[in-house]
Image (cartoon, rainbow, N blue to C red):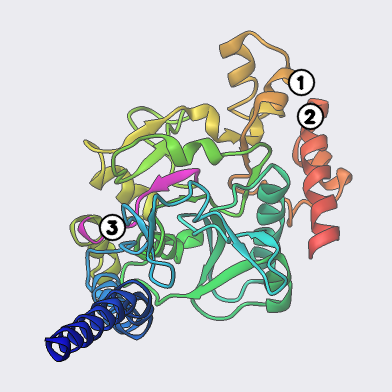
Amino acid sequence: MEFRFVKCGILFAVSWLFVTSFLLAWFFILPCYVNGPLIQSETASAQSSFKSRESESTERPGLRGSKENLDVAIDFNSSNISAPSAASSEVSTDANNTTVPAEHPRKYAYVWYLANSSSDIACAILVAAASVQQNGLRPDTDLVAIWNRGVPGMERFQKMGIKLIQVKDPVSKGKFQWTYSFVKLRAAELFQYQRIIYFDVDAFPLASMDNLFEIAPFPVELAAPRAYWLKQPLVQSGGPMVLDPRQIFYQRDFAKPMEGSMGSLAGEMDWVNKHFINTVFVLDGFYALLIGEWCGVDGAYRYWQKHYEESPEWVLRQAVLVHFISDWKPWLLTSPAALEKRCIKAQPQLLQIYQKWWDAKEKYC
C-alpha cells in the first residue's frame, strides 16, 4: 500500500515538473525564438519580395513615381506600418542626421537655342538666363540651351547652371536671317520636362514669367502671344512660347518641319501660324512688347500707352518681355550714341532698357 502511494507521488511530481517546464517554455523561450530568427527570416523574405516588386514598378514604363506614391510607409526592421509624412519627399538627412531639403524634381524649363556657335547669341543667352534668375526662378525649373554646332565660353554656361543639350539641324530651313530659326522647334523634343517656356535671345525678360507654367491644367500643344503689330490672326513665335513636350504632339506637329522640308517658308513663325491656326493658345500681345513702343519713329510707337491710356513709365513697369526685333539688337547697337542714331525721337525708357541689357552683358559675358 505504501509502495503504491509513493509510486503515485513520484508520478504526480514528474507530471507537475513536465507541465511546469512546458509552461515556462511556452511563455519565455518560445517568444524569444519567434521574435528572433523566425520573424527576421520572414521579414527578410518579405523585404526582398517588396524590393523586387518596387523595382519592377519603377522600371516598367507608365509607372513613374510608384515608390513615392505608396499609400503607406513600411518599416521592415520594426514591423511598424504608418502613414507617410507629408514632407517625406521634401527633406532628407545628411551624415550627421541633420534634416536637409531634398532636391526638387525638375518639371519645367526655360529654353533658348544657339545656332552655329555665335558668340553674340551665346552672350545673349547668358543675359536672358541671368534676368530670369533675378526675376525669381521656381525651384523645379531648369535653364536650358539647345545648340547645333558649338558653345562659345561653355564654362560660363556651366557656372550659371544652364544645361546644354545638343540637337541636330532640322531638315527645314528658313531664309535670310531666319535660316536656322527652325532649330528652336527642337525644344518640342525635350520630353523630360512637363512644360517649357521658350523665347528668342533678342527678347529681354523684365519680369517673372513663371505664371505661364500654370496657364492650363491640361496639356498645352502651343501657346504664343498675339503678334499685335500685324494683321490678325497671327501669333509671334519669338516668345514667350509655351508648349508641353509630348510624343503625341511631336509626331502630330513638330516632326513635319524637323524631318521634312516646309518648302518656301521664310521662317518658323510662318509655319507656326499656318500649322496651328486653329489650335494655338493665344496669349496677350502685352507679353512681348516691341522695343519700338518707346521710339517716336517706329510703327509700334506708344501702342500700349494708347491702349491702356497710361504713361511710358507705367508700360515699362508692367512689361514682362521686350523684343529687340529686326535691326534693334542690343549687341549691334552698343552705345547711347548708336541708339540715338537709330531712333532720333526716343522716350527715356528706350535708353533705360538698353542700358540694363548692356550692364548685364558686361557682368555675364
Q: Return the x and y of residue 107 as percentages of the image width and height.
A: 45, 55
Report crowding for label 3: few under 14, some 14 to 19, many 20 or more residues within 10 A (C-alpha).
Answer: many
Residue positioned 22% across, 87% down in the render: 10
Can you tell which quarter of the image residue 273 is in?
top left
Label 1, residues with CA under 10 Å away: few <14, some 14-19, many ≥20: some
Of badges 2 and 1, nearer the viewer stands 1
Please, what is the three-letter code of the amino acid marked with disc 3? Arg
Left or right: where does residue 291 sit relative to residue 355? left
Residue that appears at 25% across and 64% down = 63
Residue at left offset 34%, top offset 48%: 270
Query: What type is the residue that disc 2 sits on?
Result: Gln
In the picture provided, is 196 more to the left or to the right than 209?
A: left
On screen, 10 above or below 60? Answer: below
Secondary structure under tag 1 reads helix
Image position of 197 (left or right of 201): left
Q: Nearer the viewer, mark 3 or mark 2?
A: 3
Location of mark 2 (residue): 349
The numbered disc on residue 313 is 1
Mark 1 vs 3: CB contact within 8 A: no
Regarding mark 2 in the picture, which secondary structure is present there?
A: helix
Residue range (magenta): 239-248
In the image, residue 197 above or below residue 120:
above
Could you say which disc has been placed on residue 246 in the image?
A: 3
Q: CA distance from mark 2 to mark 1?
A: 7 Å
Residue contact at pointers 2 and 1, CB within 8 angstroms: yes
